[in-house]
Amino acid sequence: MGVRSFFNDMVARDNYDEVMEYLAVTETQHAPRFEFDDAPEQLRELISVAETPRSPERSAWLNDYADKSWSVPDGEAEVILAKDHLNAIRYVNRYLRKANAKLKQDGYLVCSFDTAQKRRAQIFSKYPRFFAYIIYFFDFLWHRVCPKLALTRRFYYLCTRKVRKVFPRPEILGRLYYCGFEVVSEQYIHDRYCVIGQKKREPHKEPHTYGPLIKLRRKGKGGNLFNVYKFRTMYAYSEYLQTYIYENNDLDVGGKFSDDYRVTEWGRFLRKTWLDELPMIFNILKGQMKLVGVRPLSQQYFNLYSEDLQQLRIKTKPGLLPPFYVDMPETLDEIQDSERRYLEAYLKHPFRTDWKYFWEIVGNIVFKGKRSK
């Protein structure tokens, strides 16, 4: 790239409308649309009005609908419209829990928010790219990091006259599942992201943290569930989207979900370098895992396996170094065959099998650079 072209690139601005058209396609690539047949009539009317061009009449109708929907006694509402976009609500989970209490079983919550991608598009279309990178960095720290840290949260709300938190799409979807909803529709309406959640259960009670270390429920020996420790590689609340991702995304090479938008850029680096799994050493020290063995799986992923392999898996502890790195399988069937070979050999000769697999795995990772995607 020449000096002139580099300079032109740094002073250029993105086209906001073009970026939003692109996001409307890419961010909803695997998302269900508002096309389900059993939707109540008032929900259809609400979406129909929301999709009309912006006008004072449209805003007045939506505000009036939101006020009326929240005035219904607890447990009786069929459709609720959020009174404001979620970026402007300080206690989002508390708000979603209240909506859950208002709705009857299988009732619908309609909410909207500005995504982190939209915020980036706003900055890069307003400022030359050189300045946009700098502004976006500090905007990220202020509107995404500060509201979530205990040390800076109070200062952030003290300084901001109006809440303007920025959420990545996976975080809001995960919060909805955390608060007892299942997402039945996602789409951009104008330039705001609209999500329809259906009440299916009571909200989760366990606290959620934003820390770099997370605990994930995984299937262990005897079929018991235990907490696996890992460094965070996904957006907050992404762990609650496991079933949703499974229902809407295909499996990619290596048995991972294709186009898994829950993984952050930093998380991809941690996964590629295998650093995200280092905290599993704590699980080994606690006796829940061993050094070599099949991966600890979530209940949803475990259910994809054949019944005979499920029974084989729960006879042993899962391991930090899986047989995947010996065979490098690409499809789910190949992964199952690889694990079956290891498990059958391990049950006959435990030490000999783990010793052999350990050196093959280390050789493939260190000297041949093999990695999971």
Image (spheres, rainbow, N blue to C red):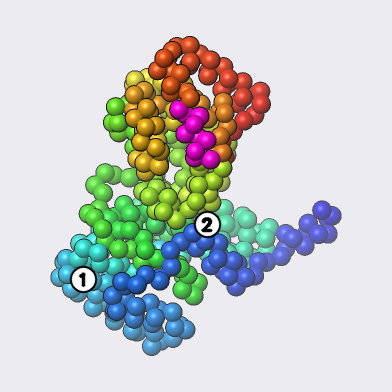
* Image x and y of residue 348, in percent: 41, 14
For residue 51, side relative to residue 104 (left or right): right
Residue 85 seen in the current view: no
Q: CA distance from mark 2 to mark 1?
A: 38 Å
Q: Which residue appears at 61% of the width and 24% of the height?
A: 364
Asked if the residue at tag 1 contacts the one at tag 2, i.e. Cβ–Cβ closer than 8 Å, the answer is no
In front: mark 2 or mark 1? 1
Secondary structure under badge 1?
A: strand
Q: Is residue 117 above or below residue 358?
A: below
Task: Give how far across and how far down residue 94 sits, in percent.
Answer: 27, 57
**Which x, y percent locates residue 23?**
55, 64
Residue 325 % position (x, y): 56, 28
- Report if residue 63 lies within the magenta region: no
Mark 2 surroundings: few (<14), some (14-19) or many (≥20) residues within 10 A: some
Q: Of residues 137 and 151, which is closer to you in this image?
A: 137
Q: Quadrant of the C terminus?
A: top right
Q: Is residue 170 rendered to the left or right of residue 123?
A: left
Mark 2: amino acid: Asp
Residue furthest bottom as drawn: 57
Residue 337 shown in magenta: yes
Mark 2 lies on a secondary structure that is helix
Q: Between residues 200 and 21, which one lies in front from this camera angle?
A: 200
Specify the amino acid type for callout 1. Ala
Q: Which mark is residue 77?
A: 1
Specify start and end residues of the magenta stretch as a single range: 331-340
Residue for point 72% across, 59% down: 10
| Numbered tag placed on residue 139 in the rendering | 2
**Residue at point 57%, 17% (across, down):** 359
Q: Earlier in the sequence, mark 2 or mark 1?
A: 1
Residue 168 visible in this rendered orientation of the protein: yes
Most common secondary structure along the magenta stretch? helix
